[in-house]
Image (spheres, rainbow, N blue to C red):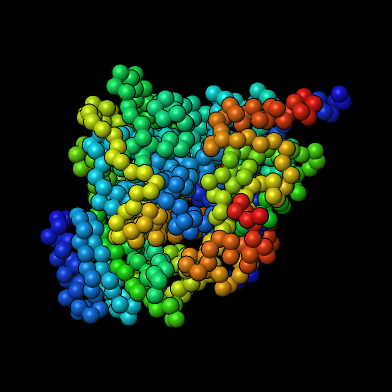
Amino acid sequence: MSILTWARTRSPWLIHFNAGACNACDIEVVAALTPRFDVERFGGLIKGTPRHADVMVVSGSVPRKIKDRLKRIYDQMPEPKFVVAVGNCAISGGVFQDCYNVMEGVDKVIPVNAFVPGCPPKPEAILDGVVKLLVSAGY
Amino acid sequence: MSDRQFVIPIGPQHPALKEPTSFYFTVDGETVVDVEPRIGYNHRGIEKAMESRNYIQNLYITERVCGICSNAHQTAYTGAVEEAGGIQIPERAKYIRVFFHELERIHSHLLWLGVAAHEIGFDTMFYYVWRDRELVMDLLEEISGNRVNYAIPTVGGVRRDLQKDKFPKWHKILDALAERTNYYIKVASTEQTILDRAIGVGYLSKEDMIRLSGVGPNARSSGVPCDTRKTAPYLLYDEIPFEHIHVDNGDVLGQVLVRVLETLESVKICKWVLDHIPDGEITTKFNPLSKIQEGEAAYIVEAQRGELIHYTISDGRNMPYRHKIRAPTLANIPSVVERLKGGYIADIPIVLAGIDPCFSCTDRMAFYDEGKDKSWAWDGEQLRRHGLEWYKK
Amino acid sequence: MSIEEQINVVKDLVNEFGEDSVYDTKNPRLYKAFATVKREKLRDAVKYLKESHGFVHIITITGVDMKDRYELVYHLRSGGFNLNLKVPVPKDDPKVPSITDILNGAILYEREVNDLLGVFPEGHPDPKRLVLDYDWPEEIHPLRKEWDVQTIREKVDGKKWGKDVE
């Protein structure tokens, strides 16, 4: 495999975006940074801006007001980029199906590479999802 | 002040409220002159959805209004429905509900302490506090099966019981938590790096706080005695001995002190519950087809961030006619706007995080400098770094 | 506060404004009371409660669509005592006087009721949209009973969609 792929898959920089979630998935994503679960052993760092990031971690059923912002953040990431949808709400709307303001699922707005189900998924499951994504990209 | 406000690129979420939010700041040099909040990015249409689901299905929706205060929402929802329907719950169920209410308060205040330390730039304390928070998460997972969204209260009682033979182990965990919390009280009140960033920052007086109807630890840090557990006790709080914590500082240091001292009180309440819990049943019969008589009820609880109200109107069916939820962070927005005015840009992250919005990450804010008539956009990470460098000088 | 003091506060309110403006009072239990107030006397009642009995804190404002009228419920608090004032509003004249200058904390709640139910607060300093999208159609107020989920989706997205629709 080329040296670029080797370098990219061993240092995935993450950005986390809350697209209208209840915050349960978000605290599990932040808990994945803490010493017990530790995403840094895979080379991952949480960055504050999409222009430095390779992988976007999205949670939340998407309300209408935030749909355009999600698309804009996705467009600001440089290629190659990947998206991980965390939680039941990001996959299909979760408990909020049939609510008038909800577009059910992130894949109605941007293309998604990996889904991590759960409400909320445990931090180990989120790390598992990110690692499986890296393996499929050529780790 | 000119009224040339322009579009803020709203990016990832903000060091602000429960929902991803945007703020319009009007600045003059380094000082903030005016703030306008814009909310609604997290509006999912829950109140309308609750009108077409029965009372047991609504339990699952109320749990997911907010992931950090999910148990507080369920306690208030079941309290309102039981009051409207005249349902009495068994004594043992009240003790179990109080136990989880206080455990969730401990986990939420420790979460806030770590995030506030991260906003100041004290990352070591962030990692220490979240490691200690894992003690509480393990305890919750052992009893209920999930770290978040425990689903313990139900209409008529609680779902799961506490096993008596595990009580000595839980007492040891609670004692370890109390010892770590005492260590953090010592750090918060004597460590010079924290005191420099926290004393005098974002000051709001007691009269202004009352005028703007602030709630929760945000109001208690300015000296307003407004804890619902003491002023209008619900469940068992008129029998349990604990202190009413409020301080007079009015700034960010007051917020830190109120929350850490409340964590100690919650540990004491949990230990009291484990020592005094009676035997008995844990639930009365209630199934998805049960009807609630006509009536209405308003139920107020003290959630981690302040007072939370659930108001329900029933018309005799097994679905509510109208259910209204008002979460405490919405009541704290006017007071945080006042706190920000007159301060430096470098203090924005810690003042916004000080009211404990549900989760804080990053966002884009646009700045419009009146004096030099130029505008630029920053995100939360750049804002944090600007704050750290400003204070190094 | 004991339950006698609570009953006295509500009786004072009724005596001050008369039986035809403040009626239908209930005291279900300690710390809770309900009363219905006519729309024209709302501002005077709130001012009287704030100055004479210490009701300086407003918890929230609820908007309800009853079948023949709208009803706004103002939840006020003084210490531990929670008093709820209901104000009936006719459906063909959905307006209510604003109380933002008496109780500053009500500024966001009145905007929310205007957004979701369509009852306009007269005299509010800044009655913009609060929660709904910027290009949401003006005439759809989701909490009204005539709008259900599929009708809203048809109006906003152009078609019905979801798990019940084929």
Measured as percent of width and height from the top left, residue B276 is found at 21, 29
Residue at left 29%, top 60%? B295
C12 over B188 or under it: above or below: below
Residue at left 39%, top 75%? C68
Q: Is residue B104 visible?
A: yes
The image quadrant where one finds the N terminus of chain B is bottom right
| Image position of B386 (left or right of B336) | right
A30 over B16 or under it: above or below: above
B294 over C126 or under it: above or below: above
Q: Is residue B175 visible?
A: no
Furthest toward the right, the residue is: A2
Furthest toward the left, the residue is: C4
Q: Closest to the observer: B338 or B318? A: B318
Residue at left 15%, top 57%? C3
Measured as percent of width and height from the top left, residue B251 is found at 41, 48
Measured as percent of width and height from the top left, residue C77 is found at 28, 60
